Image (tube, rainbow, N blue to C red):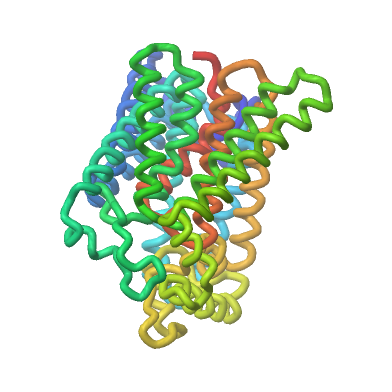
Amino acid sequence: MASADATPAASGGPVLGRWQGLIAPAPAVLHRLEGLAGILLLVLLTGLPVLTRPGLALVIAACGALWLLWSLCSPPHRIGAISLWLMLFLAIAIVATGFSPVPIAASKGLVKLLSYLGVYALLCKLLLSNGRWWDRLVAGLLSGGLLSSVLALRQLYASSEDLAGWADPNSIGAGTIRIYGPLGNPNLLAGYLLTLIPFAAIALLRWRGVGARLLAGTTLVLAGTATLFSYSRGGWLGMVAAGAVLLLLLLLRWTRHWPLVWRRLVPLAVLVVGAACLVVAATQIDPIRTRITSLLAGRGDSSNNFRINVWMAAIQMVQDRPWLGIGPGNAAFNSIYPLYQQPKFNALSAYSVPLEILVETGIPGLLASLGMLVSSLRQGLKQLNTDGPSALAAIASLAAIAGLLMQGSTDTIFFRPEVQVIGWFALATLVSRPGEP
């Protein structure tokens, strides 16, 4: 990952990056590689909700291959803190794969992890090469989100029988109509859209053209509305977390030159008012109240009861293999989980991102992930007081990561490519520090 966060390396570069720059092409070739990388990533980010899984896999693999080719043609960069933690996590995943009780299944998960890291590396290299691509990639991301939101909201007028597959008759919220758009899953739709909301809001502030602002504003409104009508409790909490972090960081940035008293009081007052509005919505708006009640019902709600049983089984898996886990990937999980599951509670994942990381890579993997998270927060907050638009890009990324963390506490939608790729885009934004357009 030598294309990561910082400046070009001096005197030969890092040991891990000395294979880079072995080919010395003409500047025109490098320019073409940049353009090809931008187009490929634009196709990926725009097509996330509509491409088939084989199609996404093909584009993701092409991103990794193009990163290797481009790296051979350009010198390495010094490896920064975020990428060091990421490389440590990769090393732990490799060791966990080697010691896995199901190494063949775990190797499939390792290949998936490497393919996503190829997308991340190409994003870093492109944004370090030319920061103008950030706005173009966000425009593609918002275009896909706008299409998904429109298709999802159209389902409000569809036959209720078509949406009945996501109505749980044993839940407190039985009979609730949940939209799922082109992604086929309301929780996945919410996880995908909630990450777009901060980017749409920042694009609305950052972009200048009327058409561009219209795209950002329309996507912001429709994505937020579609997330609400997905009735995904994790999606709602993630959207609230993303919105709160976005608002707080914007206030801290806008008031940084104010007197100290106002710098402290204004953000606090706005957050208190926002919290009060949420309380009113949760107690006075019936559909929202019903879903919040189901969230607090514990085992009294069928969805909660299912997750709790899966979590208990996953904790037993961690207790048996706390240091290296069972190896990365859902194939390894599906191979081992049946040995621990309670009757009638089969699952495809641990339904919690931190717990899934513990199951797959043990305590060292979770610690490496936390180190990467802390480094990402530091990197983003460093840019908060800068004057360029890179500060706004960092705010959008931090807000998106906050939303993913909140939803990921009780779901593993993050591991789907439609969501995970956006997470890597947010991280690459922090790493590459996009400059002035």
Q: Quadrant of residue 50?
A: top left
Residue 131 in percent (x, y) is at 49, 20
Q: Is residue 304 above or below residue 159?
A: below
> Is there any visible trace of residue 324 in the rendered image?
yes
Instruction: Give the tally of numbered discs.
Output: 0
Q: Quadrant of residue 48?
A: top left
Residue 130 in percent (x, y) is at 47, 19
Please give the name of the residue rendered at 37% of the width and 38% of the height, measured from the top-left corner: 223
Between residues 76 and 299, which one lies in front from this camera angle? 299
Residue 296 in percent (x, y) is at 54, 67
Q: Is residue 35 above or below residue 209?
A: below
Please give the name of the residue rendered at 45% of the width and 36% of the height, measured from the top-left corner: 197
Please give the name of the residue rendered at 54% of the width and 36% of the height, measured from the top-left corner: 397
Residue 276 in the figure: left or right of residue 186:
right
Tell which residue pokes out farthest to the right in this image. Answer: 260
Residue 420 in the figure: left or right of residue 45:
right
Between residues 11 and 152, which one lies in front from this camera angle? 152
Tell which residue pokes out farthest to the bottom in this image. Answer: 343
Please give the name of the residue rendered at 60% of the width and 24% of the height, measured from the top-left corner: 391
Q: Quadrant of residue 43?
A: top left
Residue 148 in percent (x, y) is at 28, 40
Residue 297 in the figure: left or right of residue 23:
right
> Is there any visible trace of residue 3 in the rendered image?
no
Tell which residue pokes out farthest to the front in this image. Answer: 284
